[in-house]
Structures are given as C-alpha cells and as structure tokens.
Amino acid sequence: MQQPKNLKRLLQALAKQGLDVNYNDRTYSVRLNDSPDAPTAEILLPEDFPVEAKALKQLANLAQICHPAGGSVCKCCATPDFHPGDAGVAIGSIVQTEGMLIPAAVGSDINCGMRSHVVDLSLEQFLTKRDRFVELIKGDYFFGTRDVAMTAKTARALFGYGIPGWLDAMLDAPTGSIVKSNLDQLATECDRVYLGGSMNGDWKWAPEELVPDSGIVRDGGLATIGGGNHFVEIQVVEEIEDKATAFAWGVRKGQLAFMVHSGSRNVGKYIGGMWRDRAQAAWPKHLKYPDSRLFPLSVTANPNLVSDYLQAEATAANYGFINRLLLAELLRLRLREVYGDLEAPLVYDLPHNITLCEGNNWVTRKGACPAHLGQPVIIPGSMGTTSYLLIGKGNPAFLSSASHGAGRIRSRFDLSREGAHKSEDALGLTGVDCITLREERRIEEAPAAYKPIQPVIDVQVAAGMVGVVARLKPVLTFKA
C-alpha cells in the first residue's frame, strides 16, 4: 500500500505538537505523548487527504477522557470526513465509553441527521413546473408560510415519544398543514426511521415556551433547515450499483429524490448547552479541570445525572426526528400540489450526533452515522457533487459507523473572505442551482469548501464499512 508523501516529516511535525502518530494502510493512529495508557484513536483517511493537527489533537483528547470516580473510553476512532470541530470535538469522531458519558462529545446539534425520499417523477417532468414548485417551497422554508402548529398535548407527546407520540396526538387533534398529509403513510414510514423515530424523552427538558399547559403551540424553529451545512436538496437517481438492495428499498434509476439534512435546531442548542454546563459543575471540586475542558459524567459518581442527561438528549433527538419529518412532509405536500398525487416514499432517516447504548457500552457519534449490518446509510456530497445511498456492513473496527459527508476542507470564514473574489468555476458553483436568501451562503457552502466525496466513499467501501447502493446527482439545493 502506497504511503502518503512526506510521511516521515509529517509524523515528526506532529510529534513536536505532543502527538504520538503512526500510519498503516490508510489509517492513522494517534494519542497524546503524555497519556501512554489512553486508548489509541484511529482515523481512516484517503492517502492524499490533508492531516489536520488540530483535529488529531481533539481526537486524542477525546480518547484519553476518564472520570476519577470511574468510567473510561474503550475505543475511539474517526471517519474520513474528519476535521476540527468548533467545540473541542473533531467532526467525524466516534467514541465508545464504559461507566461514563461525555455530553460534549455530542454537542448541541443533537440528532442532526439525514432523511431521503424517492419520487416517481422524472427530471424532465419536474423541470416543466420547477419555478412554481420553488416559489411555493421557498415560502414554507424561508418566508414562514408553513403551518406546523400543534396543540400543547401534541407538543408534549413530540418531546416525550418522538414521531409515534406526535402522530398519535395528531390523529386526536389534527392541526396545521398536516391535515392534508397521509397520516397512515407517516405511521408506516416509522419502520424506515432509525429507532422508529422515538427515544425515551420527557417534555420537562424542552424550552418552557414550547410546552405550555394548554392552547396552540406555534414553534418558529420547527420545520426549518438551519445554518451550517444543513440543506434540503432535490436530486435524481443517477446510477444503481446494488440492484437487489435498491429494488428492496424502492429506488430506481431516473427517479427524482429529495434529501433533508437538519437537526434539533434551537432545542438541541438549549439542551446541549444546559448539559455542557451541568457536566462541568458536576466535576469533583477538589480536582483541576481536564486540559481538554471535556467533562464526563460518571455512572458511579453521578448516576442520576447520567440518566437525566440521556433523557434530555433523547428529548432533543425526538424533536430532531420531527423536524426532518416536517421539512420532508412540507416538500412532499408541495410536490403533490404541483405535480399531482405522488407517494414519494421514505427510503430512510438516520441520526449523526447522538449517544446510543450498543452492547454493554455507550457509543457517541459526532458527525458520523450508524452503519450496522444491512442498515441504510446516507452520505451526501456537496451541492455540486454526488450523494450516496449505501448499506452498512457493521464493521466493529469503526464501531459500526460511517461518515456523515465529505468533510470541510476550508472554513466558512475563509470562503466568505476570499470567495467573493473567485470565479464560479474556482468555487465549483458552475451549474449549481442553489436557492437561498443570502448570496454569501452559496459561497460559504460552495463545493470548493469540501473534500472530494468519491475518495471518502471509496476508502470506506475498501475498509468494509459500507457498500454502495445508488448514486444521486443534485438538481437544486435549498440553503437557509
């Protein structure tokens, strides 16, 4: 296997930054020089991808976390879209823990995730009424014409039980645009959502204004895309590579498709921030803070806090499932309004940022998705490159996980500062149909900001993490 260029020089430079790094067969292993007993974290990277010292340091810090009262990291690894995170945890990190949880390893974008549908509509048919469709969905996504109001009882059911709880309450008291939806279809599609779209939450953790005692809840953040790399995208199924699996999932070449990438919005920010502070406050008073400022919660020392955190995270995760469902359902309703009665079935919905009990331990994924054996996996490219439907292989070496995208190679600050002076070609924006209210969003999220998706997919296929089912080509992308 060919080694990266200048590997020896690279490893020497990383050693000067306090990192013990080794390389073997497209996998870097890393730990802090002063933590020889910590688990070695592993990162799978294509051979010509940049190695970012800041991200390596963040992953090594994550791997060496332990709690003085008990609790440690069992395994730590990262996917090929690996890059530095703003809150001290690298994007693409996966950590398995025993006897403790690390709230900061999930962060505040709880249950950010992907949702994918297919539509029996050709690209040519779509384009004939494209402008009418775009104007309608722009109103829903950008101008507040959406109606996702619900009763106070429905809101509490949403936070407590996710999609099934919300659906049951909606059947009792339908409100908003959902009265036009096929609720039986939504109920059936729960089987195509990870965990059935339901975790053990409790409305007591939700922002107070969203769970009143009675009346109608009008949540301005619900069914919104959000910032960063979040999007809703119309695509076309360009190629099928695994015909049997694609047939079983209802995916065919030439179909239209749409993909939603969003999370728990302000609810996740509220709950994630609350538990970052609570974890810090629970750290033993007589001990210095960890250098990483990543504070674990110990099952031995903080059993009530651990169970409360899991419930609070589940509360935000339930909201994230509903947020993606409603973004997709608004789009499906507009497709039906413009193009006639279309089923537009769900292929799958899965989370990125979440803590899950797997086996006897917890696995926390940050910018990585589950990829268990036989499970659908969705990995988007940029708005100018191919996205992928894949099937998980359940590879234990990477904790049955896969990447959540290609990974950024340039910061939004760099792109906003320099991009305005570059050509559409240089930014990769030629031919890209991006619907947004702010021109700077096109530049910040330009394809040039991201690593190439193909090597990210290829290296995971070669490592036995996923198999490719279908490739999807972008048609138009909505960015808030």
Image: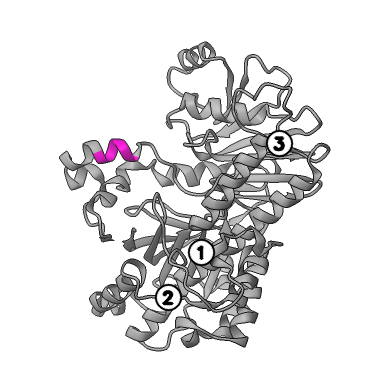
Q: Nearer the viewer, residue 76 or 374?
A: 76
Check if mark 1's residue and mark 3's residue have beta carbons within 8 Å.
Answer: no
Q: Judge whether residue 477 is colored magenta.
A: no
**Residue 15 falls in image quadrant:** top right
Residue 119 point in image, percent of width and height: 43, 76
* Residue at 68% across, 29% down: 65
- What label does residue 330 carry, if any? 2
**Which amino acid type is marked by label 3?**
Ala
Secondary structure at badge 3 equals: loop
Q: Which residues are magenta?
A: 412-416
Q: Nearer the viewer, mark 1 or mark 3?
A: 3
Which residue in the structure is indicated by mark 3? 282
In the displayed structure image, the side of residue 63 where residue 335 appears, left or right: left
**Which amino acid type is marked by label 1?**
Arg
Q: Earlier in the sequence, mark 1 or mark 3?
A: 1
Q: Earlier in the sequence, mark 2 or mark 1?
A: 1
Distance from disc 2 to disc 1, alpha carbons, whole Å, reads: 13 Å
Q: Nearer the viewer, residue 53 or 371?
A: 53
> Can residue 271 be seen here?
yes
Secondary structure at badge 2 equals: helix
